[in-house]
Amino acid sequence: MKKTLFFSALLVSYTGLASATELQFGTEQAISATSIATLQHTITQGLFSSYSHRATPTSAIPAIDHRSIYGSAPLYGEYNDDGTIGRSGGDSGRPLSNIWLDWQHSYDDIIAGDFDRFNSRHDIITAGIYGNQITTNNGHYNWNFYGGYINGTLDNPTLTSKEQGGFIGLHNKLHTHNFIINSTINTGSLKSTTDYATLSDDHTNVWFGIAGNIAYELELDNTFKIYPNLYIGYTWTKNQTQNELYSENLKNHTFGFFEISPALSAVKHIGSNWFGTLNIKYVNVLNADKNIKINDTTFELPTINGYTEYGLALEKHTENFVFRANINRHDGDLSGWAGGLNIKYIF
């Protein structure tokens, strides 16, 4: 038979074993996996939120003889709107286009059905290097290799979990005609140290993610563009506990999360190389693993549904640097705030 697992029923009598019960462990595993899916969203959005390749308006710079700089870095470049990719200056012969460093902080509540809400507090630090732009007959693209570190906590009245981990990934951005297509694959590991009242437990989640985003550029004038876009991604997580007290079925349980998120972005050149970006997106999370079977009994695990994300970013472009600050609001089954800073050096 199927039962709904409430946290009021999770804390059973202490057995003398220095480990959480299987129900506690399974529930914390589900929330930890959900947290990884939301962290994956933050990581990929930092990569994908850059759309336009925009040059400094020609009215703001003196006329130049392009023949004199053919095959070398130009006097001014093309920039993306969020400071994560950078400018392209033609075939400069350099193997790298830019390097960047990004910090994001999230302060959210995870509202998982009838379960007690979880407080999710995480910091993500990411660094990346972009290869030089490659031009084709139909557009241009860049490869980006990135890696990062995650540190944070998950807690509610029943448990507190401290999490640390890292990730690496590969990202590609293709600009063809009026379409901007982003894609990435990444993998990571997150170690959790969880305290359940008088009990404690350690385990590690590994994950693999793949995601893509396609946007269409609509230019309203030479300083204002909008980008309707669609994000699709999948995150797979697996527990790696060595605790012999848990059944093999529980130790080998995996979780899968699909995300489908339609969005609209607007980019405005304010002036003097200042740019502003507004975003709105509906994040629809589809959890493929809503139940778990323990001792022939099926229990419902905590899952989240959709939420709305509103974002604002402000950038300043200089000759060799791009500085960016962003803030985002979440409303729905993920409720709270996120924001951060990005700096990029352009070769």
Image: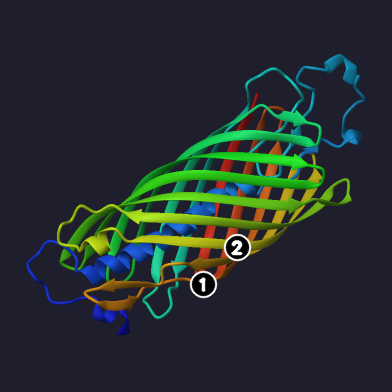
> Which residue in the rendered view is the most extreme toward the top?
68
Label 1: which residue? 305
Q: Position of residue 240 (x, y in %)?
A: 28, 52
Residue at the spot 83% in from the left edge and 17% down from the top edge:
69
Label 2: which residue? 260
> 65 left or right of 143?
right
Mark 2 secondary-structure assignment: strand
The answer to whether 264 is drawn above or below residue 170 in the figure is below
Question: Badge 2: few (under 14), some or many (20 or more) residues near its Cα, within 10 Å?
Answer: some
Which of the numbered marks, if any, corresponds to residue 26?
none
Counting residues from the N terminus, which is met first, the one under dot 2 or under dot 1?
2
Image quarter of the C terminus = top right
Q: Is residue 157 visible?
A: no
Mark 1 secondary-structure assignment: loop
Image quarter of the N terminus = bottom left
Are circles 2 and 1 on residues that touch, CB within 8 Å?
A: no
